[in-house]
Image (cartoon, rainbow, N blue to C red):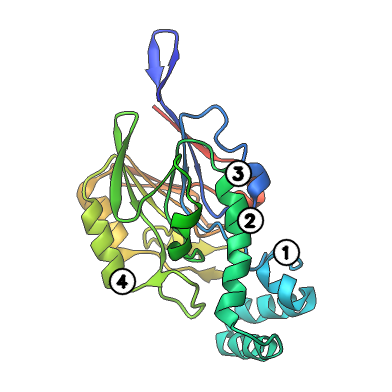
Amino acid sequence: MARTTGDTRTTRIHVVSDVHGNARDLARAGEGADALVCLGDLVLFLDYADHSRGIFPDLFGAENASRLVELRTARRFEEARELGTRLWAGVGGDRAAVIEKAVRKQYAELFAAFPTPTYATYGNVDMPMLWPEYAGEGTTVLDGERVEIGGWVFGFVGGGLRTPMRTPYEISDEEYAAKIEAVGEVDVLCTHIPPEVPELVYDTVARRFERGSRALLEAIRRTRPRYSLFGHVHQPLARRMRIGATECVNVGHFAGSGKPWVLEW
């Protein structure tokens, strides 16, 4: 797996998060790397920058998508749910089946774009039950589990914590903490959501605090991994900071940048 440059053996990992439908750049994200790490949120339900893109506008149009973004950004979640209920009432059929069909279409394209090897965990907008159908032999899916890459141990914890947004893969604080505990001591702790630190969870464009994990923060302080890598917050107040011995890094909004974050040792 490791590459050799002169007499020095190095390992290079590319890390992405919040892919949100960007299959074109995902297909190139592993170029020059020994492995790709994906921290989830493959699905694009609604692009907050371009309201014409995603499952929601495909079904209901960009105007309704803009209205939904407006309500959510204003934290008027009950009104946003009422809008969604009215729109879905006009679709007919099984809402869950319609969404699953659209997600399957995205997953088919996105998983096909993963290079070999890829190590991936779920984001809060993902549907874990579908992943086994699309993850090929070169993609290893981990959640509350560890793997060795280039001599370092990587731990993975997927999903998000419960919020008024009610995205597909939100779990209780207790369940999330149990997965963090199961991972234990690692060199690199890979999660979708950040530790609960104000600078890391505040989104400067959405102008709100996203949910971070207190259990993750406590694990970082206790086990002192070399790195804590995460995504979820698209425009964070701080993209990286040190917590004790650990370098905490938001690897970036891949859907917008199209560029992976690079880890080399």
* Quadrant including the N terminus: top left
Precedes in sequence: disc 2 or disc 3: 2
Q: Residue 78's spot in the image, x, y percent? A: 56, 89
- Disc assigned to residue 90: none
Query: What distance separates the C-alpha of mark 4 from that of mark 2?
Result: 28 Å
Precedes in sequence: disc 4 or disc 3: 3
| Amino acid type, callout 3 | Leu
Q: Which residue is mark 4?
A: 173
| Amino acid type, callout 2 | Gly
Q: Which residue is mark 2?
A: 21
Query: What distance separates the C-alpha of mark 2 from that of mark 1?
Result: 9 Å
Q: Residue 72's spot in the image, x, y percent? A: 61, 78
Q: Local crowd at mark 4 within 10 Å, few (<14), some, or many (≥20)?
A: some
- Disc assigned to residue 53: 1
Which residue occupies 24% across, 63% down?
A: 178
* Quadrant including the C terminus: top left
Q: Which residue is mark 3?
A: 26
Query: What distance separates the C-alpha of mark 4 from that of mark 1?
Result: 32 Å
Q: Nearer the viewer, residue 18 or 224?
A: 18
